[in-house]
Image (cartoon, grey):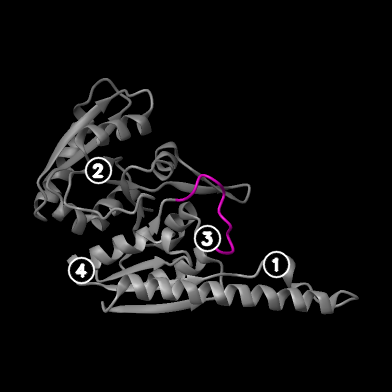
Amino acid sequence: MSYRGLLCHVPSQANLAGHLRCAVELADKFQATIIGLGAAAVPPFALRSGGAYAAVDNQWLSILREQHNAALGAAREVFETVTGERPKTWRTSWMEPTPALAAAARGADLIVVRRPDPRPPDVYTEVDVGPLVVKAGRPVLVCPSHGSCLSDAPALVAWKDSRESRRAVTDALPLLQRSCDVLIVECSPEADTAPAMGRIHDLASALARHGVRARTEVLAQPPRAAEAILTRAAQLGAELIVAGGYGHTRLGEWAFGGVTRSLLEQDRHFVLLSH
């Protein structure tokens, strides 16, 4: 298994394209094609028509489209500059970036995005990473904002015996095979850690059949699982954390589990999430 297509939403500002540089580095290692996507949508309030204000509405819509066209043109310039002569494909979409990226994921093996800002995203011009993880059907690699590249440094697998975690580990195999040290961690709510140790031992054996030598560790009854995982990753010197992404809709908005939310909020580690 390898990554042959890496998909990125490309911003119009070069200083926000650190994740694209990470994708380029991974594309070189995996001999992959880089798929760049420029996407933006006109807010619904700009699409009114008819009545006494129709002319004003049309003028405002024209201005917005000109602004979006300029931004998408700048995004393509960023894409061409960063990717150089590598194999690549460029796409433009007049959709909100999150659903546009999820749709384009059908032609990719891995989506690479930058860490989301603490503030709510502008859904018409920016990617909302949490819903993307749930909707895309592809693994999402979230890059820290400092824009460094992912090396062969240690990796931590935050294991939970669930469908999402199993998908995440399978999706992360090309990265785990590169890592110099892989640690599988399960947070057990029970004092008796034998069942949890049995589960992660099974996982380590499965990974060994794919050439990944992984160590195992159970964290017994941690008061906060997310904090325990991040602390252990820092102690390990892990660059990458692999985890299942858990989310659901509540009153029309996406709600995420504590570990998923904490992994999206931190800005130290690369995080690969699958749902």
* Magenta region, residue range: 116-125
User: Which is more foreground, mark 2 or mark 3?
Assistant: 3
* 123 part of magenta stretch: yes
Of pointers 2 and 4, the one earlier in the residue sequence = 4
User: Which is more foreground, mark 2 or mark 1?
Assistant: 1
* 62 part of magenta stretch: no
Q: Which residue is mark 1?
A: 44
Give the amino acid type for the residue marked by disc 3 in the picture: Glu
Q: Quadrant of residue 32?
A: bottom left
Whole-angstrom CA distance, mark 3 to mark 1, is 16 Å
Circle 4: element type: helix
Whole-angstrom CA distance, mark 3 to mark 4, is 26 Å
Give the amino acid type for the residue marked by disc 2 in the picture: Val
Of pointers 3 and 4, the one earlier in the residue sequence = 4
* Residue at the spot 28% in from the left edge and 66% down from the top edge: 24
Which SS does the magenta portion mostly show? loop
Give the amino acid type for the residue marked by disc 4 in the picture: Asp
Circle 1: element type: helix
| Mark 3 and mark 4 residues within 8 Å of each other at the beta carbon | no
Q: Which residue is mark 4?
A: 28
* Residue at the spot 36% in from the left edge and 68% down from the top edge: 7
Q: Which residue is mark 3?
A: 126
**Image height of 163 relative to 68, above or below:** above
Residue 132 locus on image (x, y percent): 46, 58
Residue 98 locus on image (x, y percent): 50, 63
| Mark 2 and mark 3 residues within 8 Å of each other at the beta carbon | no
Of pointers 2 and 1, the one earlier in the residue sequence = 1
